[in-house]
Image: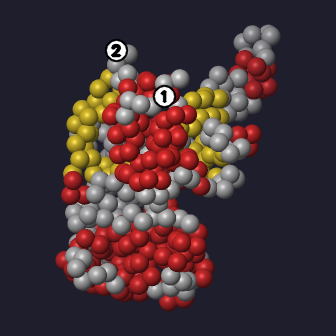
Amino acid sequence: DPPPGFRRLVPGGEVRLRYGCIIRCDEVLRDADGRVRELLCSHDPETWHGAAGSARKVKGTIHWVSADHAVPCEVRLYDRLFSVADPDAAAATADSENGDFKDFLNPDSLRVVEEALVEPSVVQDPTDTRYQFERLGYFWRDPARRDPGARLVFNRIVTLRDTWERRAARVDAERSTDARNETPSDPATPRAGRRPEVSQEVRREAERIERRYGIAGIDAETLAKDPSRLLFLEEAVNAFSSSVEVSDVAGTVSNWVINDLPRVLDRRPLEDLPFGPRELAELIALVVEGVISNRAGGAVLEVLAREGGDPRAIVDRLDLGQVSDAEALEGIVGSVLEANPGKVAEYRGGKHGLMGFFMGRVMAETGGRADPEAARAILRGRLEEDESVTQA
């Protein structure tokens, strides 16, 4: 029973998986204690990121981690040490004459998740990188666990508030206020969260963008309001081969123009960037074709914003290309399986969820550059067909 405004996944509701597709939660499976164990979901195959139907809008977009591609890690969830703001004052006013500040220690000040999963791209990052793990807070790699090959451990350094509880409390307060208020609110009065009105001119231009490129909703309005950004998108789309359908690439290009370019502009107008729409199109093509990952694409974009140049040359210079050579991946997969014979035996015994563990090891060995589809296919073949792997 989510409060109004809640946009994450709920039974019978839809969300977009970031950089993925739209899914709907059809059923929730629980254990004997009522805890959620599994979600049965269906997906809309026309809405994959970059596909022709990807412009379909839903209210919520959530981050997700693919178990098959993720890297195992340990996550330490630090929280407040005490359950009250001033434990000394609380102890002094306690009913007991022997009140002690230690009575107010928070038993949940540290919770350790030993079998967590994290995106493989973190393996390539500088060890001092800070992250926001979405919905959980800000994290930092444990400084005592930074030796090459050491198990990844992340410590939470700042928590986030629980938006569900905050929204639910606000909704309850608003309902109580409305119940006491005898005068109905003026429908013309602006309200927080209401989508701002746009001019007829912007609306007409947004409709043209939707007809021409299949880009709709807020994205179309954003482009319609900014002629320089719209021109950049149009020229980038035109830079793709004539054999490529406009509708197949426009949605992907708009994501880069609307969401990624502002991150590297540094308050400059688009015209002052040392690269143009053609270079952006070449970079997007490298990502779409699987030559580099989305993460590597972001790194190339940052270099382009600083110094310009040819995207493919930057990929070669920084050695960002995905490892997709079958022979190279075979050798890496073989090493991972030989180093983990116990896990191999468990997988063959029916614990197929260990595929994520093996993928994590392969990604770690390649610095996160292994082509995930090729690596997973080789792993599956070796685990399910090759019985010659030594069992120690």
**SS for callout 2:** loop
> Mark 2 to mark 1: distance in Å?
40 Å
**SS for callout 1:** loop
Q: Would you place residue 43 above or below residue 369 in this image? A: above
In terms of sequence position, does the residue under pointer 2 or pointer 1 come before the other? Answer: 2
> Split into 4 quadrants, where in the image is the N terminus?
top left
Q: Nearer the viewer, residue 137 or 346?
A: 346
The residue where tag 2 is placed is: 32
The residue where tag 1 is placed is: 390
Residue 62: percent from the left, percent from the top? Answer: 39, 49
Judge left or right: residue 278 versus residue 90.
Answer: left
Disc 2 residue type? Ala
Q: Which mark is residue 297?
A: none
Residue 173 in sight: no
Q: Would you place residue 269 above or below residue 194 in this image? A: below
Q: Nearer the viewer, residue 152 or 27?
A: 152
Residue 194: percent from the left, percent from the top? Answer: 35, 61
Residue 12: percent from the left, percent from the top? Answer: 23, 39
Q: Residue at x 72, y 12 (%)?
A: 95
Residue 68: percent from the left, percent from the top? Answer: 41, 42
Closer to viewer: mark 2 or mark 1: 1
Quarter residue 113 falls in? top right
Q: Looking at the image, which residue sits at the far top?
A: 97
